[in-house]
């Protein structure tokens, strides 16, 4: 098993379900993504460049979908969290129900156009 897959499968609920849903949406939008294990977390690469990552914060109790070119995104800024970052922004989910598929799809589509 690949390290990124192992990371995901070893997550407790509800994190694992959140991650699986994010993966389905992300990979359906951009089938050419490559899931790697970088910096001890699952990291998607697109056209050989970092695209987004999935990180679970057990302490803060959320899944962080980090978007590498987050500051270049023009839509859904109210949903994106920068938290002392200068390049990346993220979407955070504490439960499966918090995932807004439409917002996620639109953000993924906009990011992909930056590559």
Image (cartoon, rainbow, N blue to C red):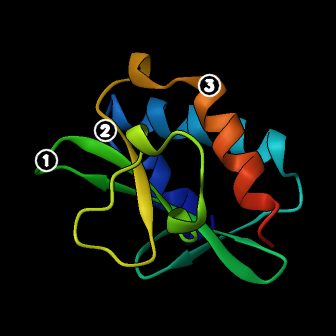
In this view, the residue in front, 10 or 97, is: 97
Q: Which residue is mark 2?
A: 12
Disc with the residue nearer the chain's start (3 vs 1):
1
Disc with the residue nearer the chain's start (2 vs 3):
2
Q: Residue at x 55, y 75 (%)?
A: 37
Q: Which residue is mark 3?
A: 101
From this viewpoint, which residue is outermost toward the right? 32
Assign a secondary structure to mark 1.
Answer: loop
In this view, the residue in front, 113 or 60, is: 113
Assign a secondary structure to mark 3.
Answer: helix
Distance from Cα at disc 2 to Cα at disc 3: 22 Å
Q: Nearer the viewer, mark 2 or mark 1?
A: 1
Distance from Cα at disc 3 to Cα at disc 1: 23 Å
Q: Which residue is mark 1?
A: 60
Distance from Cα at disc 2 to Cα at disc 1: 14 Å
Left-right relation of 67 to 85: right
On the image, the x and y values in percent for residue 92 come to 35, 42
């Amino acid at each position: 098993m690949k390290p990124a897959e192992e990371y995901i499968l070893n997550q407790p609920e509800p994190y694992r379900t959140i991650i699986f849903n994010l993966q389905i949406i992300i990979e359906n939008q951009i089938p050419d993504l490559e899931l790697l294990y970088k910096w001890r977390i699952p990291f998607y690469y697109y056209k050989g460049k970092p695209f987004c990552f999935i990180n679970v914060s057990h302490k803060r109790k959320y899944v962080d979908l980090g978007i590498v070119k987050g500051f270049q995104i023009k839509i859904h800024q109210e949903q994106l969290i920068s938290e002392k970052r200068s390049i990346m922004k993220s979407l955070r989910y504490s439960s499966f129900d918090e995932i807004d598929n439409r917002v996620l799809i639109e953000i993924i589509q906009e990011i992909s156009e930056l590559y």
